[in-house]
Image (cartoon, helix red, strand yellow):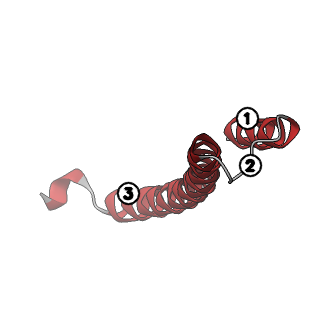
Amino acid sequence: MANIKERVAYLQGLSRGLNIRLHSDEGKLLINIIDILDDMADEINNIQMGQADLETYVESMDEDLTDLEEEVYDSVSADDF
């Protein structure tokens, strides 16, 4: 993810270095595209952080379920069925 953010920052710096201004139609277009890319990079980062949180939560639930299954099924013998 940092790679995308770094690349957008590079484009922002490049646009400043090339003196792209909002006075021209092309400048408006390029600067707005770069701004949108920056917003998209932020959203992708937020999604990735949320995904990581969900993965941690699901792994925790899986571990808890495994512990519960072991406790329940170990206490039940084959004769009980």
Q: Nearer the viewer, mark 1 or mark 2?
A: 2
Callout 1 amino acid: Arg
Residue 72 pos. (x, y %):
35, 65
**Do the numbered discs 3 and 2 sit on residues whose CB atoms are within 8 Å?**
no
Callout 1: few (<14), some (14-19), or many (20+) C-alpha neighbours within 10 Å? Answer: some
Marks 1/2 in contact by CB < 8 Å: the verdict is: no
> Tag on residue 74?
3
SS at circle 2: loop
Residue at image coords 37%, 59%: 69
User: Residue 26, position in %: x, y?
Assistant: 59, 40
Q: In what element is the residue under mark 1?
A: helix
Kind of residue sitting beneath label 3: Asp
Q: Which of disc 2 and disc 3 is earlier in sequence? A: 2
- How far apart are the alpha carbons under marks 1 and 3? 55 Å
Distance of label 3 from label 2 (alpha carbons) = 72 Å
Residue under circle 2?
21
Pick the front one: 77 or 52: 52
User: Quarter holding the N terminus?
Assistant: top right
Q: Is residue 49 left or right of residue 17?
A: left
Q: Foreground: 76 or 15?
A: 15
Circle 1 residue:
7
Question: Toward the viewer: 61 or 71?
Answer: 61
The relative height of residue 17 versus residue 36 in the rendered view (above or below) is: above
